[in-house]
Image (cartoon, rainbow, N blue to C red):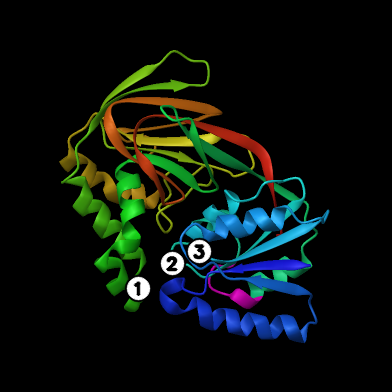
């Protein structure tokens, strides 16, 4: 049995049309399936939780949606040992499927991969915990503090994104909103503790991204060498340089050539704790967690089984 969680409102209205075609294919192939349609923000988590509780040993959840729907589902799964996740992307960013090298613009091919999968591929997940409240959220792509979080959580409400999506130029919306936010945001003084190392202080922090895959924000390669199955998080941060210099180095970031550039710091770890002098937005996979000043990021190795 395949349980399809379908965000019919995703992809700027195109998801519903794509799902209708997929449903016809499933019926033609005589595949046994059920459809679950989230009705509001957060509903996909509740649906995933209910499916996870079914008395089945091999539960297959297929997400037809974007990165936000996937994140909700990840945070709703209650028993990862019995659940296998399939992906048919219909969003605008689709960084989760990009990280897995799955088709992002061919729903039929993505469906074929799901239906023919052996279900033996495992990947890592990340977890962000707000230390002041002990509230945790899982992430599949990334979690971030500062600039990337402000942009990532605000992009879906952006008029720029809606216009550029209409013009089939959706990727530009992330870049334009990032540049706009860079010059209006404040910077932070933070203490970072990687694994069991001594804390390191960074001043004028602009952003910190804890990556499971190499790209976020519609394909920006924050950590070009990151892998989703290596048992580590890859960290990218920008700090210690004027905003105008960061602006001029932004093309290097977009091309994944920022690793040795002044102002950027990249390294891998299993855990990272950040203590900031003031609060900023925290996101998981582009979904708002809250306004925080202390967070622990950690990797959960081989946590999720993927139908690839």
Query: What residue is shown at x 46% (from left), y 60% (from top)?
Result: 41
The residue lying toward the viewer, choosing from 216 and 85, is 85
Which mark's residue is nearer the viewer, 3 or 1?
3
Query: In the depicted view, which residue is nearer to us: 228 or 47?
Result: 47
Q: CA distance from mark 3 to mark 1?
A: 14 Å
What number is the disc on residue 66? Answer: 3
Q: Nearer the viewer, mark 2 or mark 3?
A: 3
Q: Are marks 2 and 3 in contact (CB under 8 Å)?
A: yes
Mark 2 secondary-structure assignment: loop
Where does residue 250 sit, x and y in percent of width and height? 28, 48
Between discs 2 and 3, the one toward the N terminus? 3
Residue 88, above or below 188:
below
Q: Which residues are magenta?
A: 103-108
Mark toward the start of the polypeptide (1 vs 2): 2
Binning the other alpha carbons within 10 Å of mark 2 as few (below 14), some (14 to 19) or many (20 upward) gives many
**Magenta stretch: includes residue 174:** no
Q: Which secondary structure lies at badge 3?
A: loop
> From the viewer's perspective, is residue 208 above or below residue 17?
above
Say if 214 sits above or below 41 in the image: above
Query: Which quadrant of the structure image shows residue 63?
Result: bottom right
Give the position of the C terminus as an image quadrant: bottom right
Asked if the residue at tag 2 contacts the one at tag 1, i.e. Cβ–Cβ closer than 8 Å, the answer is yes
Residue 97 seen in this snapshot: no
Given residues 242 and 138, the one toward you in this image is: 138
Q: Position of residue 22 (x, y in %)?
A: 64, 80
Q: Which residue is mark 2?
A: 92
Q: Residue furthest top?
A: 198
Residue on which the image places disc 1: 165
Relative placement, left or right, of 59 versus 47 is right
User: Sequence-wise, which precedes: disc 3 or disc 1?
Assistant: 3
Q: Position of residue 243 (x, y in %)?
A: 18, 40
């Amino acid at each position: 049995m395949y349980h399809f969680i379908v965000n019919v409102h995703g992809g700027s209205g195109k998801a519903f049309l794509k799902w209708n075609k997929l449903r016809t294919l499933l019926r033609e192939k005589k595949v046994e399936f059920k459809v679950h349609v989230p009705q509001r923000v957060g509903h996909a988590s509740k649906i995933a939780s209910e499916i996870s509780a079914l008395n089945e040993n091999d539960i297959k959840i297929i997400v037809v949606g974007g990165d936000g729907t996937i994140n909700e589902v990840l945070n709703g799964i209650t028993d990862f040992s019995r659940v296998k996740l399939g992906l048919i992307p219909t969003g605008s960013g689709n960084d989760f499927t990009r990280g897995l090298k799955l088709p992002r613009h061919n729903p039929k091919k993505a469906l074929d991969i799901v239906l023919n999968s052996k279900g033996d591929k495992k990947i890592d997940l990340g977890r962000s915990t707000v230390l002041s409240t002990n509230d945790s959220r899982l992430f599949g792509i990334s979690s971030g503090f500062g600039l990337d979080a402000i942009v990532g959580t605000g992009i879906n409400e952006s008029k720029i994104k809606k216009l550029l999506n209409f013009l089939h130029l959706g990727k530009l919306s992330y870049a334009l909103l990032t540049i706009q936010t860079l010059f209006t945001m404040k910077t932070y003084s933070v203490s970072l503790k990687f694994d069991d190392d001594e804390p390191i202080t960074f001043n004028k922090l602009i952003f910190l991204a804890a990556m499971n895959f190499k790209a976020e924000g519609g394909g920006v390669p924050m950590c070009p060498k990151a892998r989703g199955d290596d048992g580590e998080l890859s960290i990218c941060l920008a700090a210690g340089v004027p905003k105008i210099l960061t602006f001029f180095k932004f093309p290097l970031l977009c091309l994944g050539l920022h690793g040795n550039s002044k102002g950027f710091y990249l390294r891998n770890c299993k855990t990272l704790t950040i203590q900031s002098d003031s609060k900023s937005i925290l996101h998981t996979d582009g979904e708002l967690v809250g306004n925080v000043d202390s967070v622990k990021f950690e990797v959960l190795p081989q946590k999720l089984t993927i139908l690839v």
